[in-house]
Amino acid sequence: MKIALLGYGKMGKEIESIAIKRNHTIVSKVDKNFIEGEINSADIAINFSDPFAAVSNISMALNLNIPVVSGTTGWLKNYSIIESLSKNYEQNNTKNSIIFES
């Protein structure tokens, strides 16, 4: 699977390590100070950014037709924005968008 990491702190690095051990490919890393790789080639995006970046990161991926798994907490006051984007995404794709708030 081709994975985009949205947030490249402690959890992003841990996810990268596990993904590589399981023969997945990290095609993009997005963090506050950089964007590396080609996010639009990802099969899925995994978001472990800070709450302030979560909504823009998730929105970016969904707008690129990339489903998202999010483990970031603290952004639910903006959940309706993502819910709307997710519904829009699902109307235009055969894959489901995946949203998870831990």
Image (cartoon, rainbow, N blue to C red):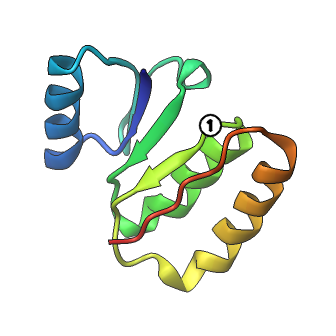
Amino acid type at mark 1? Ile
Q: Residues within 10 Å of mark 1 (few under 14, many from 20)?
A: many
Q: Quadrant of residue 14?
A: top left
- Quadrant location of the N terminus in the rendered image: top left
Secondary structure state at the residue bearing disc 1:
loop
Percent coordinates x, y for residue 40 in the rendering: 62, 23
**Going by the image, does 10 lie left or right of 48?**
left
Q: Residue at x 40, y 44 (%)?
A: 46
Question: Dot 1 corresponds to which residue?
Answer: 66
Q: Nearer the viewer, residue 87 or 95?
A: 95
Q: Residue at x 76, y 68 (%)?
A: 84
Percent coordinates x, y for residue 23 in the rendering: 25, 14
Is residue 43 depicted above or below 86 in this figure?
Answer: above
Q: Residue at x 40, y 70 (%)?
A: 101
Q: Nearer the viewer, residue 60 or 101?
A: 101
Q: Nearer the viewer, residue 20 or 12?
A: 20
